Image (cartoon, rainbow, N blue to C red):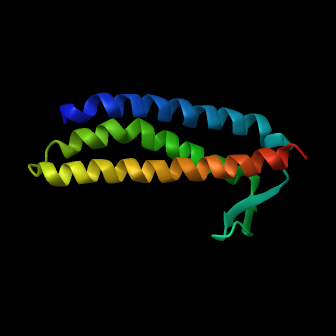
Amino acid sequence: MQEFSGIFRKMRLVSVVLAGGLVLLYGVIYLRLPTRVPVHMTGLGKIDGYGPKQIIFLLPVTNLIFALSWPVQLQKLQAYSFPGLRRVLIWLSGLLFLVLCLGTVYFSVIYLSLASR
Protein backbone atom coordinates (compact mmCIF):
# COMPACT_ATOMS: atom_id res chain seq x y z
CA MET A 1 0.00 0.00 0.00
CA GLN A 2 2.92 2.33 0.65
CA GLU A 3 3.83 2.40 -3.05
CA PHE A 4 0.46 4.03 -3.79
CA SER A 5 0.14 6.41 -0.84
CA GLY A 6 1.88 9.44 -2.39
CA ILE A 7 0.09 9.10 -5.71
CA PHE A 8 -3.32 8.71 -4.13
CA ARG A 9 -2.79 11.54 -1.67
CA LYS A 10 -2.12 13.89 -4.60
CA MET A 11 -5.00 12.45 -6.62
CA ARG A 12 -7.34 12.87 -3.67
CA LEU A 13 -6.32 16.48 -3.13
CA VAL A 14 -6.81 17.33 -6.80
CA SER A 15 -10.12 15.42 -6.85
CA VAL A 16 -11.51 17.17 -3.79
CA VAL A 17 -10.46 20.60 -5.07
CA LEU A 18 -11.93 19.99 -8.54
CA ALA A 19 -15.19 18.46 -7.28
CA GLY A 20 -15.61 21.16 -4.64
CA GLY A 21 -14.86 23.84 -7.23
CA LEU A 22 -17.47 22.40 -9.58
CA VAL A 23 -20.08 22.37 -6.82
CA LEU A 24 -19.34 26.07 -6.22
CA LEU A 25 -19.36 26.84 -9.95
CA TYR A 26 -22.69 25.07 -10.38
CA GLY A 27 -24.05 27.06 -7.45
CA VAL A 28 -23.11 30.27 -9.26
CA ILE A 29 -24.60 29.31 -12.64
CA TYR A 30 -27.64 27.53 -11.21
CA LEU A 31 -29.96 30.56 -11.39
CA ARG A 32 -29.00 31.25 -14.99
CA LEU A 33 -29.88 27.76 -16.24
CA PRO A 34 -33.19 26.88 -17.87
CA THR A 35 -35.61 24.83 -15.77
CA ARG A 36 -34.77 21.67 -17.79
CA VAL A 37 -31.19 20.73 -18.65
CA PRO A 38 -29.61 17.89 -20.64
CA VAL A 39 -28.90 14.81 -18.52
CA HIS A 40 -28.05 12.20 -21.14
CA MET A 41 -26.48 12.09 -24.58
CA THR A 42 -25.92 9.49 -27.24
CA GLY A 43 -22.42 8.43 -28.19
CA LEU A 44 -22.59 10.95 -31.04
CA GLY A 45 -23.30 13.86 -28.69
CA LYS A 46 -27.02 14.20 -29.44
CA ILE A 47 -29.07 15.09 -26.37
CA ASP A 48 -31.71 12.46 -25.72
CA GLY A 49 -32.71 13.13 -22.14
CA TYR A 50 -33.63 16.16 -20.04
CA GLY A 51 -34.19 16.65 -16.35
CA PRO A 52 -34.73 19.36 -13.75
CA LYS A 53 -31.84 21.75 -13.29
CA GLN A 54 -31.27 20.51 -9.72
CA ILE A 55 -29.75 17.38 -11.25
CA ILE A 56 -26.60 19.30 -12.20
CA PHE A 57 -25.30 18.82 -8.66
CA LEU A 58 -25.45 15.01 -8.89
CA LEU A 59 -22.13 14.41 -10.66
CA PRO A 60 -19.92 16.85 -8.73
CA VAL A 61 -21.39 15.79 -5.38
CA THR A 62 -20.89 12.13 -6.33
CA ASN A 63 -17.29 12.93 -7.27
CA LEU A 64 -16.77 14.74 -3.98
CA ILE A 65 -18.16 11.85 -1.95
CA PHE A 66 -16.04 9.38 -3.92
CA ALA A 67 -12.89 11.49 -3.44
CA LEU A 68 -13.49 11.87 0.29
CA SER A 69 -14.28 8.18 0.85
CA TRP A 70 -11.45 6.86 -1.31
CA PRO A 71 -8.84 6.61 1.48
CA VAL A 72 -11.31 4.72 3.66
CA GLN A 73 -11.93 2.23 0.88
CA LEU A 74 -8.20 1.85 0.27
CA GLN A 75 -7.65 1.13 3.96
CA LYS A 76 -10.29 -1.59 3.78
CA LEU A 77 -8.44 -3.13 0.82
CA GLN A 78 -5.36 -3.54 3.03
CA ALA A 79 -7.23 -6.26 4.92
CA TYR A 80 -7.18 -8.52 1.86
CA SER A 81 -4.22 -10.83 1.59
CA PHE A 82 -4.18 -10.83 -2.21
CA PRO A 83 -1.80 -8.04 -3.22
CA GLY A 84 -2.43 -8.58 -6.94
CA LEU A 85 -6.19 -8.28 -6.47
CA ARG A 86 -5.75 -5.21 -4.28
CA ARG A 87 -3.65 -3.53 -6.96
CA VAL A 88 -6.27 -4.26 -9.63
CA LEU A 89 -9.10 -2.95 -7.43
CA ILE A 90 -7.17 0.21 -6.65
CA TRP A 91 -6.56 0.95 -10.31
CA LEU A 92 -10.15 0.08 -11.25
CA SER A 93 -11.46 2.49 -8.63
CA GLY A 94 -9.13 5.14 -10.03
CA LEU A 95 -10.43 4.47 -13.53
CA LEU A 96 -14.03 4.73 -12.32
CA PHE A 97 -13.26 8.05 -10.70
CA LEU A 98 -11.60 9.29 -13.90
CA VAL A 99 -14.71 8.40 -15.90
CA LEU A 100 -16.88 10.26 -13.36
CA CYS A 101 -14.62 13.30 -13.62
CA LEU A 102 -14.63 13.28 -17.43
CA GLY A 103 -18.43 13.06 -17.46
CA THR A 104 -18.63 15.93 -15.02
CA VAL A 105 -16.32 18.10 -17.10
CA TYR A 106 -18.24 17.24 -20.28
CA PHE A 107 -21.57 18.23 -18.78
CA SER A 108 -19.98 21.29 -17.14
CA VAL A 109 -19.12 22.66 -20.56
CA ILE A 110 -22.71 22.12 -21.69
CA TYR A 111 -24.17 23.73 -18.57
CA LEU A 112 -21.84 26.72 -18.84
CA SER A 113 -22.88 27.25 -22.46
CA LEU A 114 -26.55 27.06 -21.44
CA ALA A 115 -26.01 29.55 -18.63
CA SER A 116 -24.27 32.05 -20.92
CA ARG A 117 -27.21 32.29 -23.32
Numbered-mark total: 0
- Image quarter in which the N terminus is found: top left
Residue at 49% x, 53% y: name it.
Answer: 99
- Residue visible at 33% across and 32% down in the picture: 7
Please tell me which residue is depicted at 42% across the width and 53% down the height of the picture. Answer: 96
Rendered location of residue 98, percent (x, y): 47, 48
6 vs 76, nearest the viewer: 6
Q: Is residue 112 left or right of residue 64?
A: right
* Residue 100 percent across, percent down from the top left: 51, 51
Q: Is residue 38 above or below residue 30?
A: below
Residue 75 falls left or right of residue 70 = left
Q: Position of residue 93 (x, y in %)?
A: 35, 50
As drawn, which residue projects farthest toward the left? 81
Residue farthest to the front, as pictured = 44
Q: Is residue 39 above or below residue 1?
A: below
Residue drawn at (58%, 53%), measured in percent from left and top? 103
Q: Position of residue 64 (x, y in %)?
A: 50, 39
30 in relation to 88, above or below:
above
